[in-house]
Image: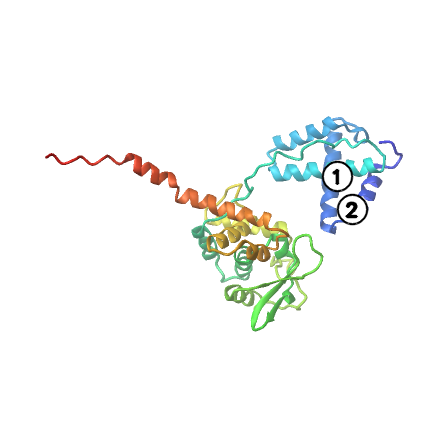
Amino acid sequence: MRTTLKLTQIIDDWIAETDILPATKADYRRKINLWFRWLSSVGVDPRHAERRNIVEYKRHLQTEGRSVLTVCSYVTVVKLFYRYCSCQRYCENIGTGIRSSVKHREYYKAALSRSEASALMDSIDTSTTIGRRDKLIVALMLINGLRACEVERINISDFDMLKGRMVLHIQRKGKVDKRSTIALPELIGGLFEDYIGDRDFEMDDPLIISHAHGGGGGRRLSKITISAIVKQRLRDIGIDRPDITAHSLRHTCGSLMVESGVDVETIKDILGHTDTQTTRIYVEMAQQRRLLENSPSNIIAGLISKKPKKKKGR
């Protein structure tokens, strides 16, 4: 580094100048600090890192078994940091030309089948407050395609009535306000009323909270905890695969809408995508499912394997 500033000061300045949400800033800070800790652990002076060190770091993350998306996010943050440092003339941009990850066309999380989605909903016992909460979480993600971070941000007051039907105001991923409004089916309206029915609450209270005994009750659950709850509910019905996570519920919603004939533009609006290119992932997922379940190759195999009929003798 061609500066006398401490690394902590450089990081602070970089974070301050980056136009991103507070939660993303915290994530950037965590990931860049992990990079510097790794450098120290392998005996490299953090102020004099080289391009080859980023390549080694990427390989280290891959050998740890991190997912493609995780490796991509960690390396991208490092590259962004050195691009900033280069603009400030603190050092060369040692991240130039380094690919964040190997790009795959496949979407990284699979969707549930219709029967699996139905089994998940049916498996949750709603005789307890926690059960009612968890079923509402699953329904919001599976039926309305919400992300875990969007469920986390919901307050009780975000449920509203519009022209005689229940709607929900959502703060979408990457947004700072709740401009997105979605219609809710009666099923979710009923789950919402059942869940808050036995709670003492103010309208501005968070919707999804902890119900732990002996302290901690009433605390808004984080997206990480919400995802862990969904993952455990999936394990409870025998689904425990790395490609099936809480985010798979959103993919299930999207792919089932495609299979049901909903047009791409409508799905885009429901899921809060900025363009249809992202939404078309679900078209590909639905097509792949159709090919697996009703492969045309089975028809060809049947035609080829049929024995020709013998001609009757004269």
Residue 79 figure quarter: top right
Work out which residue is located at the far bottom of the displayed protein and give it.
164
Work out which residue is located at the far front of the displayed protein and give it.
314
Cβ–Cβ below 8 Å for labels 2 and 1?
Answer: yes
What is the quadrant of the N terminus in the image? top right
| 3D distance between C-alphas at marks 2 and 1 | 10 Å
Residue 221 figure quarter: bottom right
> Which residue appears at 81% of the width and 31% of the height?
92
- Indicate the position of residue 55 as horizontal and vertical percent values: 69, 29
Which residue in the protein does label 2 denote?
18
Q: For this view, does 50 lie left or right of residue 70?
A: right
Work out which residue is located at the far right of the displayed protein and give it.
4
- Indicate the position of residue 230 as horizontal and vertical percent values: 54, 51
Above or below 52: residue 66:
below
Kind of residue at disc 1: Leu
- Indicate the position of residue 93 as horizontal and vertical percent values: 78, 32
In the rendered view, how is the structure colored? rainbow
